[in-house]
Image (spheres, rainbow, N blue to C red):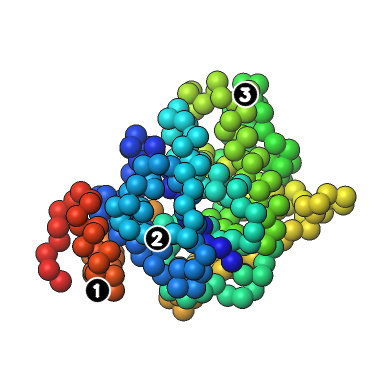
Amino acid sequence: MKAVWSLWTQPLRASSHPGWLCERHHALSWILSWETARRHYPDTCLITDTPGAAWLVDQLGLRFAEVRVDLDDLTEQQSDWWAMGKLCAYAQQTTPFVHIDSDVYLWKPLPERLEQAALFAQNPEWHTSGRSFYRPEWFEHWVGSRGGWLPEELTHYVHPQGVLRAENCGILGGTRVDFITHYARQALDIIRHPSNRPLWPALEHKDAHFVLIEQYFLAACVEFYRDRPGSELAGVAIDYLFPSQQAALRDAEQAGFTHLIAGAKRHADTLQRLERHVCKHYPQAYRRCLEVTDGPVPPAA
């Protein structure tokens, strides 16, 4: 199974999605994500743009087996949709793969059941309609009332008793790359469709809506094709590393899996542990990181 990462640098340059406390911590996380995963999956691939390749490969020295700068084709005007690079990476795969976020560390290989699964993600995310940062009804009404376009997989997704499911894509992959490619291209079409492009300047909080397009729309595609006789995508089920968000927090250490979500990227103790680990286990990469990134040099451990 191929291990894939993606980095689109334009949102970072535009400060649309800073995330990390400083550039050094971002770089350290890339080092640890790549180093831990490549022990289990040496067929590594980076999909990025020219500045991203210069930073990760030329400066930080991460030797991916394959480097592609296909994200040069994304435009500055799209940078509010900060994770479009992930969708582009998903859409380009032709063999079984796992896409790994750069804040995910695989201390152990994924379970064999995932490596053989048609489709898998980190864990399902269950939410209650009206009490969630996923707002599909609002988004569908907003786009539809302005003459925009949405795929039927999204508009036909029904929520029993108001319960919403999305998929946490800290990791995403599988053997049914045709399904993943279809989902990713449809998700990109939501952003790029000619009827939608004029609408986006008036849409606030695109970062929240992008999570809907990436994670909620994936669940919508799974449910849409679950019972669709005659479709080549029918019957593709999704598996998970963890059965719930709670299990992802409770059982992460046993699974050999770390995902620094949300505020963890700015938590002082977490960042110190990240720094100490990279310094101890990958000293050459750590020294290179200090040479090429901004941010205060930490006190000696």
Please tell me whether mark 2 or mark 1 is closer to you in this view. 2
219 and 288: which is toward the camera: 288
Inter-mark Cα distance, 2 to 1? 20 Å
Extreme-bottom residue of the structure:
254
The disc labelled 1 sits on which kind of residue?
A: Lys
Which label sits in the foreground, 3 or 2? 2
Give coordinates of residue 202: x percent, y percent. Answer: 48, 23
Q: Find numbered disc 1 in the image and state the secondary structure of the residue it sits on.
A: helix
Identify the image quadrant of the N terminus.
Answer: bottom right
Question: CA–CA distance between discs 3 and 1?
Answer: 51 Å
The residue carrying mark 2 is: 63
Residue 109 in picture, x, y percent from top left = 51, 74
| Three-letter residue code for mark 3 | Pro
Query: Crowding at label 1, few (<14), some or many (≥20) Cα neighbours within 10 Å?
Result: few
Can you tell which mark lies on residue 194? 3
Q: Earlier in the sequence, mark 3 or mark 2?
A: 2
Residue toward you, 269 or 40: 40
Where is residue 67? Give x, y as percent: 47, 52
Q: Are marks 3 and 2 in contact (CB under 8 Å)?
A: no
Q: Earlier in the sequence, mark 2 or mark 1?
A: 2
Mark 1 or mark 3, which is nearer the start of the sequence?
3
Disc 2: CA contacts within 10 A as few (<14), some (14-19) or many (>=20): some
- Circles 3 and 1, Cβ within 8 Å, touching? The answer is no
Q: Secondary structure at mark 2?
A: loop
Q: Which mark is residue 101?
A: none
Q: Residue at x 23, y 59 (%)?
A: 288
Residue positioned 63% across, 61% down in the render: 96
Label 3 to label 2, Cα distance in Å? 38 Å
Q: 63 and 228: which one is in front?
A: 63
For disc 3, the neighbor class at 10 Å (few under 14, some 14 to 19, many from 20) is few
Looking at the picture, how far across and down is residue 144, in whole percent?
Answer: 65, 26
Residue at 57%, 58% (x, y): give it. Answer: 172
